Image: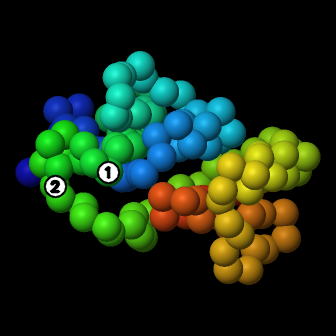
Amino acid sequence: MPLDMSERRIRFSVVTDDLQRSEALYRVCFGLRMRQLSNPILMFPLDPLGIAEFEVCLREASRDLLEFDFGAKRTTGLLVSLRFDSEAEMNSVAESALNIGAQVVGQSLSLSWNLEDFNGVNWFLSIV
């Protein structure tokens, strides 16, 4: 029986030690739309229907809110791709991300950036 995704949500949860810096990176720098929630959680819908969401939770509150104890673990294995209309726009966003605390990882192909942020999320920036 096929899974009816209209009845389910996919949530990618990331824990952070710095909620303000996470908001600056994900909302301001990367331009992700953010739902208004109160601290200690940020929610970024990833599609117009709200089926998939990227959630960032303050580590100290994650046990109560997410019902999972992350301990000191960092996020691993999550790669998010962002595509841009121009090289200038992509480079500007990458430079802003680096200034907020992301790091270049691996070897980028021409006209792309491979970044890892301070929460352990990997970002692949490329041109459409």
Q: Where's residue 126, x and y in %?
A: 74, 57
In the depicted view, which residue is nearer to us: 77 or 49?
77
Label 1: which residue?
Answer: 59
Nearer to us of marks 1 and 2 is 1
* Residue 64 higher or lower than 113, as above or below: above
Which residue is painted at 25% across and 38% down in the image? 9
Q: Is residue 2 visible?
A: no
Q: Where's residue 111, x and y in %?
A: 84, 63
Which residue is painted at 25% across and 64% down in the image? 71
Crowd band around label 2 with a 10 angstrom C-alpha radius: few (<14), some (14–19), many (20+): few
In the depicted view, which residue is nearer to us: 34 or 58?
58
Q: Where's residue 23, x and y in %?
A: 54, 36
Q: Is residue 102 left or right of residue 55?
A: right
* Quadrant of res 84: top right
* Quadrant of res 74: bottom left
For numbered disc 2, what is the local secondary structure? loop
Q: Is residue 126 left or right of residue 116?
A: right
* Residue 10 higher or lower than 111, as above or below: above
Which residue is painted at 13% across and 48% down in the image? 67
Residue 68: assigned label: 2
Amino acid at pointer 1: Arg
Please report contact status of discs 1 and 2: CB closer than 8 Å, yes or no. no
**Among numbered discs 1 and 2, the one appearing first in the sequence:** 1
Outermost residue, right side: 88
For numbered disc 1, what is the local secondary structure? helix
In the depicted view, which residue is nearer to us: 58 or 1?
58
Q: Is residue 87 visible?
A: yes
Crowd band around label 1 with a 10 angstrom C-alpha radius: few (<14), some (14–19), many (20+): many
Residue 39: assigned label: none
Kindly report the distance in space between the C-alpha atoms of the residues bearing marks 1 and 2: 10 Å
Q: How many labels does the image show?
A: 2
